[in-house]
Image (cartoon, rainbow, N blue to C red):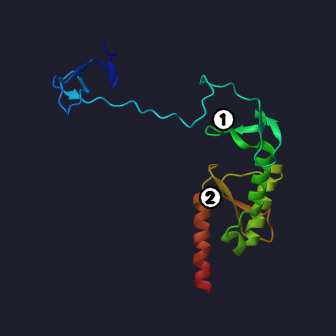
Protein backbone atom coordinates (compact mmCIF):
# COMPACT_ATOMS: atom_id res chain seq x y z
CA UNK A 1 0.00 0.00 0.00
CA UNK A 2 1.98 3.07 1.21
CA UNK A 3 5.55 3.15 2.33
CA UNK A 4 6.25 3.88 5.97
CA UNK A 5 7.03 7.54 6.78
CA UNK A 6 9.94 8.53 8.99
CA UNK A 7 8.99 10.89 11.83
CA UNK A 8 11.88 12.21 13.95
CA UNK A 9 13.83 9.01 13.66
CA UNK A 10 10.82 6.70 14.25
CA UNK A 11 9.07 4.77 11.49
CA UNK A 12 5.29 5.21 11.63
CA UNK A 13 2.62 3.96 9.27
CA UNK A 14 0.41 6.50 7.54
CA UNK A 15 -3.34 6.30 8.07
CA UNK A 16 -6.20 8.13 6.42
CA UNK A 17 -8.47 10.41 8.39
CA UNK A 18 -11.53 8.27 7.73
CA UNK A 19 -13.51 11.13 6.26
CA UNK A 20 -13.21 12.30 2.71
CA UNK A 21 -14.63 15.81 2.75
CA UNK A 22 -13.80 18.78 0.61
CA UNK A 23 -11.66 20.28 3.38
CA UNK A 24 -9.89 16.98 4.02
CA UNK A 25 -9.11 16.35 0.32
CA UNK A 26 -8.17 12.78 1.15
CA UNK A 27 -4.82 13.77 2.67
CA UNK A 28 -2.80 11.36 4.76
CA UNK A 29 -2.03 11.88 8.41
CA UNK A 30 0.66 10.20 10.45
CA UNK A 31 -0.19 8.83 13.86
CA UNK A 32 2.66 8.96 16.34
CA UNK A 33 3.09 6.59 19.32
CA UNK A 34 0.85 8.65 21.59
CA UNK A 35 -1.99 8.49 19.08
CA UNK A 36 -1.82 12.10 17.87
CA UNK A 37 -2.40 12.54 14.16
CA UNK A 38 0.21 14.72 12.45
CA UNK A 39 -0.19 16.07 8.90
CA UNK A 40 2.49 14.81 6.49
CA UNK A 41 5.45 17.06 5.73
CA UNK A 42 6.37 17.49 2.10
CA UNK A 43 9.88 16.48 1.23
CA UNK A 44 11.41 19.78 0.15
CA UNK A 45 15.11 19.15 0.42
CA UNK A 46 17.03 21.61 -1.71
CA UNK A 47 20.26 20.58 -3.35
CA UNK A 48 23.28 21.68 -1.37
CA UNK A 49 25.38 24.48 -2.86
CA UNK A 50 28.52 22.97 -1.39
CA UNK A 51 30.68 20.86 -3.63
CA UNK A 52 30.55 17.18 -2.76
CA UNK A 53 33.38 15.27 -4.40
CA UNK A 54 31.75 11.94 -3.44
CA UNK A 55 28.49 12.72 -5.23
CA UNK A 56 27.67 10.45 -8.12
CA UNK A 57 27.40 13.03 -10.84
CA UNK A 58 29.47 14.11 -13.79
CA UNK A 59 33.15 13.34 -13.83
CA UNK A 60 35.29 16.21 -12.57
CA UNK A 61 37.38 18.05 -15.12
CA UNK A 62 41.11 18.02 -14.58
CA UNK A 63 41.67 21.64 -15.66
CA UNK A 64 40.11 25.01 -15.03
CA UNK A 65 40.48 28.60 -16.29
CA UNK A 66 41.65 31.27 -13.86
CA UNK A 67 39.23 34.19 -13.63
CA UNK A 68 42.10 36.69 -13.24
CA UNK A 69 44.83 35.70 -15.69
CA UNK A 70 42.61 33.52 -17.90
CA UNK A 71 45.18 30.71 -18.14
CA UNK A 72 43.98 27.12 -18.20
CA UNK A 73 45.64 25.26 -15.33
CA UNK A 74 45.22 21.92 -13.53
CA UNK A 75 42.87 21.87 -10.53
CA UNK A 76 45.84 21.43 -8.18
CA UNK A 77 46.91 24.99 -9.07
CA UNK A 78 43.74 26.36 -7.40
CA UNK A 79 43.17 26.56 -3.64
CA UNK A 80 40.34 24.44 -2.25
CA UNK A 81 37.05 26.27 -1.70
CA UNK A 82 34.00 24.33 -0.52
CA UNK A 83 31.39 26.35 -2.44
CA UNK A 84 33.50 27.10 -5.51
CA UNK A 85 33.02 25.39 -8.84
CA UNK A 86 34.67 21.93 -8.71
CA UNK A 87 35.44 22.62 -5.05
CA UNK A 88 38.18 25.09 -5.94
CA UNK A 89 38.78 28.84 -5.75
CA UNK A 90 38.04 30.69 -9.03
CA UNK A 91 41.50 32.29 -9.22
CA UNK A 92 44.76 30.34 -9.41
CA UNK A 93 47.25 30.21 -6.54
CA UNK A 94 49.67 32.65 -8.21
CA UNK A 95 46.94 35.27 -8.75
CA UNK A 96 45.68 34.79 -5.18
CA UNK A 97 49.18 35.31 -3.78
CA UNK A 98 49.70 38.42 -5.92
CA UNK A 99 46.34 39.84 -4.78
CA UNK A 100 47.20 39.23 -1.13
CA UNK A 101 50.63 40.89 -1.56
CA UNK A 102 48.96 43.97 -3.10
CA UNK A 103 46.43 44.05 -0.26
CA UNK A 104 49.08 43.83 2.46
CA UNK A 105 51.14 46.61 0.87
CA UNK A 106 48.13 48.88 0.52
CA UNK A 107 46.85 48.46 4.07
CA UNK A 108 46.62 51.66 6.03
CA UNK A 109 49.16 51.98 8.82
CA UNK A 110 47.48 52.33 12.21
CA UNK A 111 47.21 55.70 13.93
CA UNK A 112 49.59 54.57 16.68
CA UNK A 113 52.33 53.85 14.11
CA UNK A 114 51.72 57.22 12.45
CA UNK A 115 51.91 59.11 15.74
CA UNK A 116 54.93 57.18 17.08
CA UNK A 117 57.11 56.03 14.16
CA UNK A 118 60.21 55.71 16.39
CA UNK A 119 58.42 53.17 18.61
CA UNK A 120 57.31 51.14 15.58
CA UNK A 121 60.86 51.23 14.20
CA UNK A 122 62.33 50.00 17.52
CA UNK A 123 59.73 47.24 17.83
CA UNK A 124 60.54 46.07 14.31
CA UNK A 125 64.30 46.08 14.97
CA UNK A 126 63.86 44.07 18.19
CA UNK A 127 61.60 41.51 16.47
CA UNK A 128 64.11 41.07 13.63
CA UNK A 129 66.96 40.67 16.14
CA UNK A 130 65.01 38.01 18.06
CA UNK A 131 64.27 36.09 14.84
CA UNK A 132 67.93 36.31 13.77
CA UNK A 133 69.15 35.15 17.20
CA UNK A 134 71.07 38.36 17.96
CA UNK A 135 68.76 39.08 20.90
CA UNK A 136 67.34 36.50 23.31
CA UNK A 137 64.19 36.88 25.38
CA UNK A 138 64.96 37.00 29.10
CA UNK A 139 62.68 36.47 32.11
CA UNK A 140 60.80 39.43 33.58
CA UNK A 141 63.20 41.57 35.62
CA UNK A 142 60.51 42.21 38.26
CA UNK A 143 58.83 38.85 38.88
CA UNK A 144 61.05 36.41 36.96
CA UNK A 145 58.31 34.83 34.82
CA UNK A 146 59.02 33.70 31.27
CA UNK A 147 55.35 33.88 30.17
CA UNK A 148 54.43 36.75 27.78
CA UNK A 149 57.70 38.64 28.26
CA UNK A 150 57.99 41.91 26.30
CA UNK A 151 60.85 44.26 25.48
CA UNK A 152 60.54 47.68 27.14
CA UNK A 153 62.55 50.55 25.65
CA UNK A 154 63.77 53.19 28.06
CA UNK A 155 65.40 55.09 25.19
CA UNK A 156 64.04 54.76 21.64
CA UNK A 157 67.28 56.03 20.13
CA UNK A 158 68.89 52.73 21.28
CA UNK A 159 66.53 50.06 19.91
CA UNK A 160 68.49 47.00 21.09
CA UNK A 161 68.88 48.21 24.69
CA UNK A 162 65.74 46.80 26.27
CA UNK A 163 64.42 45.86 29.70
CA UNK A 164 62.53 42.55 29.68
CA UNK A 165 59.16 42.76 31.49
CA UNK A 166 56.09 40.54 31.55
CA UNK A 167 52.96 42.07 30.03
CA UNK A 168 51.58 43.03 33.47
CA UNK A 169 54.73 44.81 34.65
CA UNK A 170 55.27 46.37 31.20
CA UNK A 171 51.81 47.97 31.40
CA UNK A 172 52.47 48.99 34.99
CA UNK A 173 55.73 50.70 33.93
CA UNK A 174 53.99 52.64 31.15
CA UNK A 175 51.21 53.73 33.53
CA UNK A 176 53.89 54.93 35.99
CA UNK A 177 55.71 56.82 33.22
CA UNK A 178 52.43 58.34 32.02
CA UNK A 179 51.67 59.67 35.50
CA UNK A 180 55.19 61.15 35.76
CA UNK A 181 54.80 62.91 32.39
CA UNK A 182 51.41 64.25 33.50
CA UNK A 183 52.92 65.75 36.67
CA UNK A 184 55.83 67.31 34.75
CA UNK A 185 53.51 69.04 32.29
Name the quadrant containing residue 123: bottom right
Identify the element where label 2 is drawn. Answer: loop
- Residue at (16% x, 25% y) in the render: 19
Give how far apart the Cα atoms at labels 1 and 2 are. 54 Å
Which of 24 and 157 lies nearest the eye of the viewer? Answer: 24
Q: Position of residue 54 (x, y in %)?
A: 61, 24
In this view, the residue farthest toward the bottom is 185
Which residue is labeled 1 in the image?
A: 87
Note whether 35 is above or below 87 in the view shown.
Answer: above
Closer to us: mark 1 or mark 2? Answer: 1
- Residue identifier under label 2: 142
Q: Are marks 1 and 2 in contact (CB under 8 Å)?
A: no
**Residue 155 visible, this orientation:** no
Residue 15 in sight from this viewpoint? yes
Quarter of the image for the N terminus: give it.
top left
Q: Is residue 9 above or below residue 95?
A: above
Amino acid sequence: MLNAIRDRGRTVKPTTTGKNTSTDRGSLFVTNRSGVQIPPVASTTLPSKKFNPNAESKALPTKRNCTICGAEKPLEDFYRHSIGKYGRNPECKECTKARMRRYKRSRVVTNHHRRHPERARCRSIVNEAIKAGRLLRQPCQVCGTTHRVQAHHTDYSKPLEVVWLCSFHHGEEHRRLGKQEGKAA
